[in-house]
Image: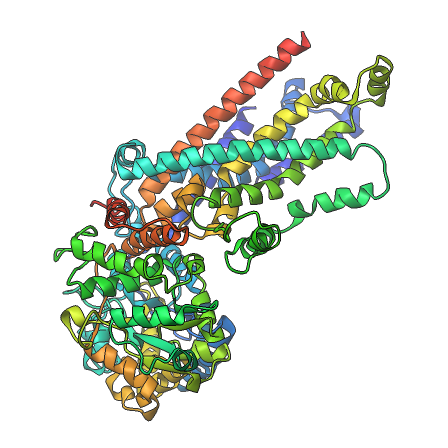
Amino acid sequence: MTTTTASAESGERTVRENSPGAARGPRRTGRIKRIGLPYLLLLPALLLELLVHLVPMVIGIVMSFKELTQFYIRDWGTAPWSGLDNYQVSVDFDAPVGEALLHSFLVTVAFTLLSVGLCWLIGTAAAIYMQDTFRGRGLLRALFLVPYALPVYAAVITWVFMFQHDNGLVNHVLHDQLHLTDKPSFWLIGDNSFVALLTVSVWKGWPFAFLIVMAGLQNIPGELYEAAALDGAGLWQQIRRITLPSLRPVNQVLVLVLFLWTFNDFNTPFVLFGRSAPEAADLISVHIYQASFVTWNFGTGSAMSVLLLLFLLVVTGVYLLLTSRGRKTADV
Amino acid sequence: MRSIRAAAVGAVTMSLALAASACGGGSSTGGGSNDSPKTLTYWASNQGASIAVDKKVLQPELDKFEKQTGIKVKLEVVPWSDLLNRILTATTSGQGPDVLNIGNTWSASLQATGALLPWDAENFDKIGGKDRFVDSALGSTGAQGKDPAAVPLYSMAYALYYNKKLFADAGIAKPPATWDELIADGKKLSKGGKWGLGAEGASLAENIHHTFVFAKQHGADFFTADGKPDFTNDGVVTAVKQYVDLMAKDKIIAPGNAEYAQNQSVSDFAKGTNAMLLWQSASANLKSQGMSEDTYGIAPMPVQSGTPGTGTNVNSMVAGINLAVFKNTDNLDGATKFAKFMTGDAEQKILNTAYSTIPPVKTAQSEAAFNSPANAVLKDTLAKSAVALPQVADESQFETAVGTAVKELFAEAAAGRPVTTDSVKAKLEKAQQQMPTK
């Protein structure tokens, strides 16, 4: 229905613009129509967005106030309302469920900080290095992007094979060839799993940082560097005084996006560790999945998801506030 | 402007309503119908060495069924890693298959959702009566005192598979009958890159199956008589420790097995890396990995002392696959006919032979193929010394919580850290606290 209206209006508008003398109706209607058109054109996308994102979110929030266990999932309209019980269970850090959630949250924070930091560092370093023209630069750039282009499942399952205790490539190199460890290490269970997870995450994430920073670098005028070189600035000073400040707006978005992606990453830990992740690498997304799907308690799972959503909203809000304020003062 | 806003509000409201009704649409509480009598959808579990093998085994039988009844069966073989999630999703949305296979240990959990057709006397009559099935298999079809949520399809039992050549090389004359003997033999066998026993340390289900039997052998249970979790009683703690100690203290399981969850221990056994394997109905799997039947022997799973029997001398869980009908099927008669076909003597013989399982149907068991020495051990175990896993609604949560605890204990053993009564108890305590309280 909306599409018909939209096309009819735009058609009418075209007709009128083509023959100015034939304008009908008061001018106000014309202005409203002019203002309204973009909104109408946006409407289909907006509706889909609502359907795909907001509706499930609202349903999830509703679910978090219900006692939705296996006894009710078949007809979850009949699940009893449980008020704030699910939230109480989730944030009671002295009880096992809340304690496990807090542990998982802290692991996720540490993992995200390290992963985003390393991704950004490696990505930026590589992008700056790739600014100089040299033979094989195109090839290297393409090669760097491979981890980003690979399907997640295929890439991570390859890592699973490499991290295996008995026949994995990692142990073969570290233990058999370089003799760095006394005995082969476990990467997929126990404490090392955090390192394994971080490795895969950085390997998978840094090409994106590389890509974005590389794009940002193209906008920095070469004259700036020439002038700086004339003034006697070295490479390090050029990076610090010209490159990084010029990249600021790019980095601002890049870090936020990397943060959200990494914090919410489900595929990497799930493919690496399966449905019960080792404690050291118990990321919150898998933890919530386990709390809802594996223990069949969708109410508590939803409550945890809502808490996660709130946390990410707050972090994003504060981050945007701080960075935009910083930019304003920098502009002055 | 107002008209646009009104249109926008209208559209948003409509899409919200649509979404809401779409979500609620599937959850019909009705009892099923016969609206599409000519087709059935069947989710089979992965019983053979691969999904392709299963399709090859099942498709000719489904064609037979179509010829007999005119009902076309759409087959999907669902891997084990997805099956429970798929069933849960189907239960929530109401968009499921008509007939499906379930692991028999899930019977009570799925029964509690109310999504499966209860097999009351009337329904059982349609497939030849409850008496056709052996008791041990019926004991794993749902909570006690309720109509079964499914009918037994394939039965399996745990047994000790041992490599004859490795045993002969080590000078061991006969397979161990008690755990002490198994450990002693295991120590003789664990040398030169070979190991006494294989285990799936990261597989939650395998961990549950073994610790459950160990607990039974110590006269303990994971649940109290009224169905409450009781994971930290002395018997259970001893049982879990005894199982993990096979790696931690006795060192007859390779540490690497702590991260196994994809049946790697079966492959290791087929390759001759492990001399022993505790597994359910492994013959077909071993054959597909190139291990010929005369190179390995099958013995009953060990007990603490004496010979396998009831009480503290049980040596296997009742393993198996059940066939269930989704309550809101739109071909109820067809689904019952299909259940009758699959549990009929002829199909039972064909399918159980193909999967090296034991028919849970009495009349089909007499067939010669199920009385070979290998199958005799499994059949005997099922008949005399196997018990069903707890038939409680929280069974699947129990598998996850305790299975994970044992997995973590194996990880500690593999890393060379000591596994003590206290550390075992702490893990089990944590598992118990994760169980639903209501």
Q: In the rendered image, is residue B317 in sight?
A: no
Q: Position of residue A194 (x, y in %)?
A: 48, 42
Task: Identify the residue at image location x=56%, y=52%.
Answer: A175
Q: Position of residue B435 (x, y in %)?
A: 25, 47
- Look at the image and tell me in which quarter the N terminus of chain B lies: top right
Q: Looking at the image, which residue sits at the far left?
A: B225
Image quarter for residue B48?
bottom left
| Left-right relation of A231 to A174 | right
Task: Identify the residue at image location x=44%, y=41%.
Answer: A283
Q: Position of residue B315 (x, y in %)?
A: 24, 72
Who is closer to the viewer here, A127 or B278? B278
Task: Identify the residue at image location x=52%, y=31%.
Answer: A113
Q: Looking at the image, which residue sits at the far bottom?
A: B368
Who is closer to the viewer here, A193 or B342? A193
Q: How is the image coloured?
A: rainbow
Who is closer to the viewer here, B36 or A31? B36
Who is closer to the viewer here, B70 or B324? B324
Task: Identify the residue at image location x=46%, y=84%.
Answer: B292
Q: Above or below — where is A242 with respect to B248?
A: above
Instruction: Count the numbered circles shown.
Output: 0
Q: In the rendered image, is residue B22 in sight?
A: yes
| Left-right relation of A101 to B181 | right
- Look at the image and tell me in which quarter the C terminus of chain B lies: top left
Q: Above or below — where is A143 with respect to B225?
A: above
Q: Looking at the image, which residue sits at the far top?
A: A332
Image quarter for residue B70?
bottom left
Q: Position of residue A125 (x, y in %)?
A: 70, 32
Image quarter for residue B365?
bottom left
